[in-house]
Amino acid sequence: MTKPRTTGPKPWISLSGIGVFAVLLLAVAPLVLTDHWLNNLGKYCCWAIAAVGIGLAWGRGGMLVMGQGVFFALGAYSMAMHLTLETAGDRIPGFMVLYDPLAPLPMFWEPFRSAGFTLLAIVLLPVVMAGILGYALFKRRVKGAYFAILTQALAVALATLISSTIRETGGDTGLSDFKYFFGFVLNDPANKVMVFLIAAGLLIVCLLAVWQLYRSRFGELLVATRDAEERVRFLGYDPANVKLVAFVVSALMASIAGAMFVPIVGIITPAEIGAAASILMIAGVAFGGRASLFGPALGAMAVGWGQSSLGSTWPEGWTYILGLLFIVVILFLPNGLSSLPSRFPGRTRPKPDVPPTPAIAAAELEEVRA
Amino acid sequence: MTDASLVVTDLRVEFSGFVAVGGVSFDAHPGEVRFLIGPNGAGKTTCIDAITGLAKGTGSARLGEKELLGKQVHKIVRLGVGRTFQTASVFDELTVLQNLDIAAGRHRSALSLLRTRRGVDPSIEQALEETGLAGELTTPAGILSHGQKQWLEIAMLLVQDAKVLLLDEPVAGMSQDERTATGELLRRIAAKRIVLVVEHDMDFMRRYATRVTVLHQGKVLSQGTVADVQADPKVQEVYLGTADAIAVGTPNRKED
C-alpha cells in the first residue's frame, strides 16, 4: 500500500482554505440553501466532524478505526437522552410507558436531566472509553487488521446491545420526537439555523484543531509512528502514547459529531452507529484522502450528499455506485481525491536530483580495485 | 557521563530452544571504536538486539551502574543506548530536519509537542555539521542516497544524546569514499562516546577498529586488537572455512 502524502501545502494556504470553508458554511449556506438542504448540510457536517477525527487516527496515525460508531453513539445517545427528558418534562418518556407504564426511569437516565452533565458526558465519555481501550490495545501492540476488526466488533456489539434493550434505549426504533434543544423549540426555523451553525462551527473548530496538530511536533511524531513504529521506540518514545492521543482526539470528535447529529436529524437508532454506519464514515475519508487536511471532511460530505440525493432517488443503485467509487479510488487514487492535484505534471513540486546510488559506485570501485 | 562503560557478561539469547547467543562477554569503553565481527549467524545482531531490549536475553548488560536487560526498549533508549539497523530506517515521509527534530525530542514535555517547531535546535545543527548533511535540511529523508540515510541515522543518535551507539553494518552498500567518510566520522564521535560496530566488511574493520571481538556460532572466538585477532589461528580457521578471508594482508572483503 502506498503511503499517504503528508507534506501538504504551506500552512497559510491551509489556514485560508479553512477560512473560505468557514465563510461558505457559516455565511453563504444559510442564505442560499432551502431549509431542507440546510438541514441535510448540517447532517453532512456531523459526518465530516467524525471524518476529521478518522483522518487524524487513520490517515496520520495509521490506525484503521472501523468502529467510530461507538463514540458517535456515546455522544448521540447522551444528547438524545437529554432531549428526550427535556421533551417529556416531569413524565416518563413516551416509549418507556409503552412497555411498562409503572416502571420508574432507569437509573442511568437520571443524570441526563442536567444540561451540564449531558455536555460533560459528551466530552468525557468518549475520552475515558477511548483512553482505556486505546491504552489496553496499544500497550499490547495490537495493530493493523486486528485493531480494525476489534473496533469494528465493538460497534456491532454496542448496536446489538442497544437493539436488545428496547425499554431502556428505545431499541431499533431509537430515540426521536425531540421538541426542545436546551430550551429552544426545535421546530422553529430560526433555531434550526442556529443548530446548523453550531454543527458547522464545530466542524471548523475541529479542522483548526487538526491543522495545528498536523503542523506541530506531535503531528510529525504521529506520522513517524505510522511509518516506522519500531524506529520511534528506538528514539526513546513510547509509540503507544502517541497513538493513544490521536485515538482519543478522534473519539472525541466522533462523539461531538453524534451529539450534533441528534438535534439536526431528529432521530438516533442503532443503524446509525453500527458496522455499516462506521464503514460509511471510513468510506468518505478514503474517498477524500485520509492524510490530507480537507480530504476527510469533504469526502464525508460528498458521500453524505450522494446518499441523500442518489440514495433517495435510486436507492437500489446507490450502494453499487458507492462500492464502485470506492474501488476506483483505492485502485487509482489510493491517497484519495485530494491527491488529484499532485497528479498533474505542472503542479508537482520539482523533485531534487537523486544522487547516483552508492551501490553502483561501490560496484565500480570494486572493478577498479580488482 | 563519558566514563561509563558498556559491560556485557555471559549474555545468552535463545529462540525457542535455538541458542543464538550462548554466553558472550565483552566490554566497550568511550574513546574506542569497538567492532563485533563474525560469519553470518554468529549472533552479532542478536547481541545488539538483546542489549537494546528487542530480543530477550539472560546474563547481564550494564551501562555504568545500570542493568539494561529486562527493561523496555524505549526505557533503555532513555538510559542513553541508541542503535541503527542493517537497513536504514529513517522516516521517509519527513524531512531531514523533522527526522532529527523527533530524535532530539525525547526530553521535551508533552505540551510542547503541540507547538510548531521554530528554528533549528543547536544540537541538530552540530549533528548536521558532523555528518555532512547540512545542505539537506529540507530534503525528504526518503530521497537521500543510501549513504546519506545511514549518516542521518547516526546524526539522529547524536542529537538524541546517546552515550552508546550500536551500529549494525553501517557501511553496507556504501562506496569507498562513503566508507572512509563514515570511518572518520565514527572515530570523531567515539572520542566521547561508546561506539560498537557490527560489521562484515573486514577492510573497514582493519582500518578503523581499535578493538575487535570475533563471534562464532554464538560464542566469543577471539578478542583483542586487530593484529591480535588476525594472528589468532582459530579466527583464521573459521574465516578460511567460509568465504570471508580475514588472513593477514589480503584485502578481500565480503560482498554486501
Image (tube, helix red, strand yellow):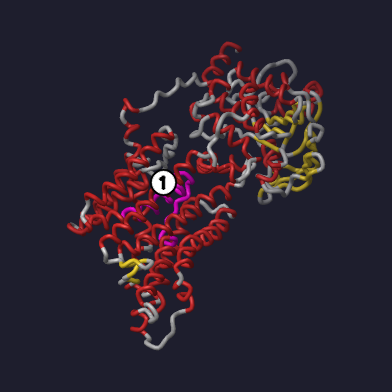
Question: Residue B206 sits in which quadrant?
Answer: top right
Q: Badge 1 is on which residue?
A: A207
Question: Which is more toward the observer, B39 or B95?
Answer: B95
Position of B134 with respect to B31 (left or right) is left
Q: Is residue B10 left or right of residue A85?
A: right
Check the image and name the residue furthest to the left. A313
User: On the image, which quarter does residue B132 sit in?
Assistant: top right
Q: Is residue A84 above or below residue B99?
A: below
Compared with residue A41, is residue A111 higher up or lower down, i.e. above or below?
A: below
Percent across and percent down for residue A138 are 56, 53
Q: Which residues are drawn in magenta?
A: A43-71
Determine whether the residue tagged by mark 1 lies in a helix, strand or loop: helix
Residue pictured at 56% horizontal, 60% vertical: A132
Q: Quadrant of the N terminus of chain A?
A: top left
Residue placed most toward the observer, A346 or B246: A346
Looking at the rendering, in which quadrant would you find the C terminus of chain A?
top right
Percent from the top left, x then y, of residue B145?
A: 52, 24
Q: Residues within 10 Å of mark 1 (few under 14, many from 20)?
A: many
- Residue at 50 percent across and 33 percent down: it is B94
Residue A369 vs residue B74, the one in the foreground? B74
| Identity of the residue furthest to the top in this view | A368
Name the dominant secondary structure of the magenta segment. helix
* Residue B78, horizontal then vertical, whole percent: 69, 42
